[in-house]
Amino acid sequence: MPRSVDQKMMKLALSEADKAFFSDEVPVGAVIVDDKGQIIASAHNEQEHSKDATGHAEVTAIRIACAKLSCRRLVNMTLYVTLEPCPMCAGAILLSHIGRLVYGAPDSRMGAVESIFSVLSHPAIKNNIEIRGGVLEDECKLILRKFFAVKRTGYKSREPFSL
C-alpha cells in the first residue's frame, strides 16, 4: 500500500490509542484493513477494563476481524498498530495469517518483531508477512510518553490528546 495510506490508517490506530489513554489503559491502538482498504476491525488496549491479560489492541482487533469475517485466517489483511507487537501479539499475528504488519513505535522492552525478538521473521517459522515499522513513529511515541508521564505524576488529565 502507498505510504500515504499507511499514514492515514496509522492515524486511525492513534485514534484508538487515544481512547485507551482516556480509559486509563496503556495507549495502544490497532486497525485491521483488507486489501481494498476497507476497515474490518479496530481496537485499543483493554487489559485493565476487561481484567484480561490478553486484552491487547492487536489481539482484540484480530478477534473482532475473525468474528466479523467468520474466518480465522486474515491472509489479505494489514494490521496497523501504534506500538511494535509483544511476543503474545506476534504469535496471534502468525496464527491469524495476517499478510502485512505496519507499526508505529518500536518497543525496546517487549518488541517481538524487530527490537528484542524477531518472531515474525524467525527462519524456523515459514512466514512471509510483510513488515513496515516506524510509521508516524514520533506521534506513536508521544502518546505513550504522555501517558506514562501522567502515571508518574498522578495527574488526571482531562484535556484530549491531539495529533
Image (tube, helix red, strand yellow):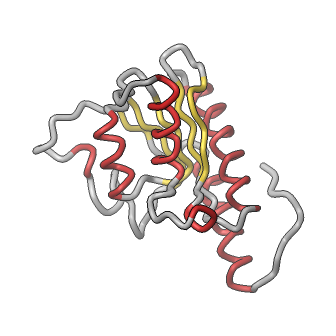
Picture coordinates of residue 61, whole percent (x, y): 52, 41
Q: Is residue 38 above or below residue 14?
A: above
Quarter assignment of residue 71: top left
Residue found 70% across the figure and 68% down from its top: 24
Q: Is residue 67 above or below residue 89?
A: above
Please name whichever residue, 132 or 30, is drawn nearer the observer in this view of the structure: 30
Residue found 81% across the figure and 81% down from its top: 155
Picture coordinates of residue 151, whole percent (x, y): 69, 79
Q: In this rendering, would 119 be left or right of 145?
A: left
Please name whichever residue, 133 or 152, is drawn nearer the observer in this view of the structure: 152
Q: Which residue is most to the top? A: 36
Residue found 34% across the figure and 49% down from its top: 90
Q: Is residue 62 above or below residue 54?
A: above
What is the count of numbered marks?
0
Picture coordinates of residue 14, whole percent (x, y): 67, 47
Q: Is residue 138 above or below residue 3?
A: below
Residue found 10% across the figure and 44% down from its top: 124
Quarter assignment of residue 20: bottom right
Q: In this rendering, would 116 be left or right of 106?
A: left
Q: Which residue is most to the right? A: 159
Picture coordinates of residue 53, whole percent (x, y): 46, 65
Q: Which residue is most to the left? A: 124
Please name whichever residue, 60 or 103, is drawn nearer the observer in this view of the structure: 60
